[in-house]
Image (cartoon, helix red, strand yellow):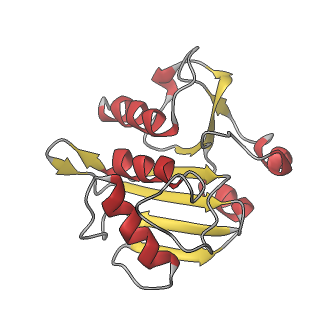
Amino acid sequence: MTRNFIIISNTVDTSKPLSINSLTSYGRLDVLCRCISTAFFLSNGFRKDVLLYIYFTLDKSILQIDGSTVRGINPDERAIAGILKRVFQGLPFLGIRFYTGNLEELLVNYKPVMLDIHGEGNPRNITTSQSFLIGDHLGYPIEHTNLFSKLKKISLGANEYLSSQTITVLNYILDQD
């Protein structure tokens, strides 16, 4: 069963020229690079059962990374940013797709549960049959409140975790199945 993660990026503008030497000046691309790394990489392995989407609110674009087909990716932020720089410029990369899209379509197709500190707090109810919607460091955009109100909300507990940590915790829970 594939693990599906959908991450909302509120600050990265994919149309700007990207410098891998200053990821934080490009919105919070560092946050997304960490999310990509934690979604796919194990200490001595790679998760081929992950499908990761990043929705960029600023330019309404979607990055899709398919663990079953992506090749040549390394876990460090600079290497991931280098790949994203190429992809944002329209260059192909095996297993990665970048396209104009809309969040509603992603939510309808995958019917994710939304990670929310005020959601249902029983991690035992998390299963691999679910998709997961995760906000970046700014959370979820207000303009999509109506879309989000229709989603089931779950919590990982009383603490707010970084987006990348949320993915790590979810992967840990899903590994127990």
Residue at point 13% right, 45% down?
44
Question: Looking at the rendering, which quadrant does residue 133 occupy?
Answer: top right
Question: Is residue 29 placed above or below 92 in the rendered structure?
Answer: above
Q: Please identify the residue farthest to the bottom as the structure is shown.
A: 91
Q: Please identify the residue farthest to the left as the structure is shown.
A: 44
Q: Where in the figure is residue 40, as x and y percent of width and height?
A: 32, 51
**Is residue 152 in view from this perspective?**
yes
Q: Is residue 55 left or right of residue 19?
A: right
Question: Is residue 168 placed above or below 123 in the rendered structure?
Answer: below
Q: Is residue 61 left or right of residue 21?
A: right
Q: Please identify the residue farthest to the top as the structure is shown.
A: 158
Q: Is residue 154 left or right of residue 59?
A: left
Q: Where in the figure is residue 110, as x and y percent of width and height?
A: 59, 55
Count of marks, rendered view: 0
Residue at point 56% right, 17% down?
159
Q: Is residue 147 left or right of residue 98?
A: right
Q: Quadrant of the C terminus?
A: top left
**Is residue 1 in view from this perspective?**
no
Q: Where in the figure is residue 61, as x and y percent of width and height?
A: 64, 70
Question: Is residue 176 placed above or below 107 in the rendered structure?
Answer: above
Q: Where in the figure is residue 77, as x and y percent of width and height?
A: 36, 53
In front here: 162 or 122?
Answer: 162
